Image: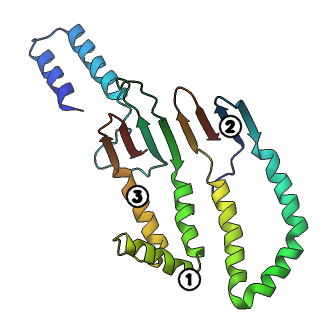
Amino acid sequence: MTESKKKILEMLAENKISADDAYRLLNAIDTDEGGRGSAPKVEPGVKTRPKYLRVNIVPDPDAEGSSGDRVNVRVPMSLIRAGIKLTSLIPAEAMDKVNGALKDKGINFDVRSIKSEDIEELIEALSELEVDVVSGRGENVKVFAE
Amino acid sequence: MNRPPMLMHLKIKGESANFGLWLPLFLLIPLALVVLIILSPLILIGVIVLWPSGWGKKAVLALWAAIVSFCSLRGLKVDVHNPRESVFISVV
């Protein structure tokens, strides 16, 4: 239960508001929470395995002559898992090239060190991922797992 | 491994092209199986020849990875649109 819901119930218990008002306020909170388009709420302490990685890009509707692309992508986690596992098929010479390219970009990481148990850990950690960025042009970028 | 996807919905809207397509993937699976069975002796010979060099194992793993990736496509949804053009891909 959120703080605002608790507050409404307390106000109802103290007879500061009527039952009708409390009902309307609770409904308004539920609608607001449901309409934000954010990741589904998870009770604290309960870890669920995410099924999809979502990427939403919404252009600013108020921008003049707005013709930005609206993007809504849903990628199954199983596809990400399969994709990461494919790295084990990359020949050693290609791996060296990938590592070299990463080093050139300032990333000191050995792609060969990715193991299947790391993949599971990585995907589980994605359940807590939520990126919400509003760009300078007013675009809203959201990345989350659901 | 997941169940393989059954249908693919493709919708493209633009100035030059405007079409929607339901691809029955479930009809392609038996077809792919038949092709695989017909080609299996050739694949087997290829794998045996390449095995000592290490590429045979990689070829088998790549084939398996391709099947797993295909089966993982279920649930994929890509929707990109602007006022002039739109692309929608959904795998169910």
Quarter occupied by the C terminus of chain B: top right
On screen, residue B88 above or below A65 = below
Residue at the disc numbered 3: A124
| CA distance separating discs 2 and 1 | 38 Å
Please identify the quarter of the rendering in which residue A32 is found: top left
Residue at the disc numbered 1: A93
Query: Which three-letter amino acid code belongs to the residue tagged 1?
Result: Glu
The tag on residue B9 is 2
On screen, residue B65 above or below B6 = below
Image mark 1: chain: A
Question: Which numbered disc flags the more N-terminal residue, 3 or 1?
Answer: 1
Task: Give the residue drawn at x 34%, y 38%.
Answer: A41
Comparing A56 with A16, the one in front is A56
Q: Helix, strand or loop at disc 1?
A: helix
Task: Give the residue drawn at x 54%, y 37%.
Answer: B80
The residue carrying pointer 2 sits among few (fewer than 14), some (14 to 19) or many (20 or more) residues within 10 Å by Cα, namely some
